[in-house]
Amino acid sequence: MNRHVVAKARPRVLAVALLAALAAPGMAFGQTAKEQELEARIAQLEAQVQALLSQQQQQQTEIAETRTQVTEVRTAQARAPAAAAADGKGIQPGTIMTAANPGTTFSYGGMIKFDAMVTDTSDGRIADGSAGRLFYVPSTIPVGDDGADGGDAYTDQHAQFSRFWFSADHATDGGDKFKAYIEADMFGGGSNALLGNETATNTYGVSLRHAYVSWNRWLAGQTWSNFMDVGALPDAVDFVGVTDGTVFVRQAQLRYTNGPWSVSVENPQTTVQSYAPFSPAAGARFNTGDNVLPDVTARWITRGDWGHFTVAGLVRQFKAGDETETGAAVSASGKFNLGASDDIRYAVNAGQGIGRYLAFGMGSDVMQDASGDIHALDGYGGFVAWRHVFSPQVRTNLMYAAAHYDNDKSLIGFGVTERSHSLHANVIYSPFPKLDVGAELIFGQRFLEDEREGDLTRLHTHVRYTF
């Protein structure tokens, strides 16, 4: 039964298929015009889509390449300081000084230093606004009559020893080396009478510390005297610390250095203590500005893993009006390492007319008699300091300094300084590299020729960040 039905249906299915095959060409021919327009638009859209896809792929490729380049640059920048430290060269790829020689490199640095101190003096107060209120200056310790009362202790705070410096360095293809250096701080008083005080704004003027140019072995300009050993200065909280026994002078000079030897001719100046025979008060102290010949210095230094040792000599001419005198001085100083955690720093200074070079000029260069003749004043002083490092964060220093002058009392009286000494002990904490927080206890005494004396006791603290 089923087979019969299927057999009868087959001719009908075949007929329908044949009819569809015969009608298809006509139907296709009737729709060609519309479909061709539609297909053209579809093809155009497909081309635009393909172009957009290609552009997007190109942009993604460029972005990936840019990211790779940025990563490479950052990696090179991170490695540059280590490479510069290894070869001794700076990381600056080119000059940023438009007026400098091609290839000149520029550097900048300095420090911010906040000082706070409480001072107690036995014979009156140090004058407000004077240098002795900012750091330890033995010549400013008040000395009065027996039984004089210095009153209550007094407090000072300032940031005047903050400083900054600029350096421009250049090396030629022939190996010549040039350097220009300038440094300043704010230890120079106010810019005007209204602002340059502690009443309101504590505005202070910029003071020149160093300004020099060097060319290979030559140096010309203002910097530390060749008679001074900066490397022997102790690690103090106070600006200097061992001021009594320290040679401390910055001045204009022309210097030549060859290996361990250096010689210089430096700016001359004569300080005079005037005639005041057997007077209980000192005579006038003044600078003459009459010098003709410069101060001449020579230094020899040797260095090693153990530290350094140096000897320096000084020859000077003194002149007041038409009167002249000569003097000479010598200094021996250095630093001796006692293992990795301890060192000893020291200096011994002595000579005729060493006055303005020692202890911030506590003694004069010459004494003047009644006829106007001048006589070189003998003086000597020194210091010793022990430094101990407990850890990279904590260190301590113990220091002692003294100075003495052989005044002729028959010429300048009893009111001049005969000697001074001081003892310092400090602790300095560095919670981070370049950041110091320190406290220093200072006890100092100044004695006059008539044996009157004045005491100073001070707690000096600071916060210092070096950059």
Image (cartoon, rainbow, N blue to C red):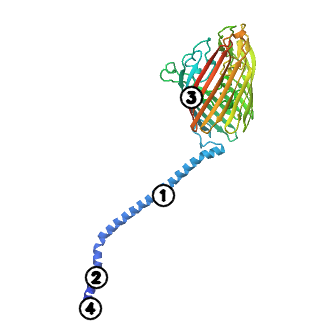
Mark closer to the chain start, 3 or 2: 2
Point out the frontmost of discs 4 and 2: 4
**Kind of residue sitting beneath label 4:** Arg
For the residues labelled 3 and 4, the Cα–Cα distance comes to: 119 Å
Which quadrant of the figure has residue 251? top right
Disc number placed over residue 325 in the picture, else none: none
**Pointer 3 residue:** 461
For the residues labelled 1 and 4, the Cα–Cα distance comes to: 68 Å
**Kind of residue sitting beneath label 2:** Leu
Q: What element carries label 1?
A: helix
For the residues labelled 4 and 2, the Cα–Cα distance comes to: 30 Å
Question: Callout 4: 10 Å neighbours few (<14), some, many (20+)?
Answer: few
Residue drawn where x is 61% and y is 16% of the image: 142
**Pointer 2 residue:** 22
Q: In this view, does 5 lie to the left or right of 234?
A: left
Point out the frontmost of discs 1 and 3: 3
Mark closer to the chain start, 3 or 4: 4
Which quadrant of the figure has residue 280? top right
Residue 141 to residue 467: above or below: above
Residue 68 to residue 138: above or below: below
Question: Callout 3: 10 Å neighbours few (<14), some, many (20+)?
Answer: many
Of 118 and 301, nearer the camera is 118
Point out the frontmost of discs 1 and 2: 1
Residue drawn where x is 27% and y is 76% of the image: 27
Q: Is mark 2 on a helix, strand or loop?
A: helix
**Kind of residue sitting beneath label 1:** Thr
Residue 267 visible, this orientation: no
Where residue 135 sits: x, y (%)?
A: 59, 24
For the residues labelled 1 and 2, the Cα–Cα distance comes to: 55 Å
Mark closer to the chain start, 1 or 2: 2
**Pointer 4 residue:** 3
Disc number placed over residue 61 in the picture, else none: 1
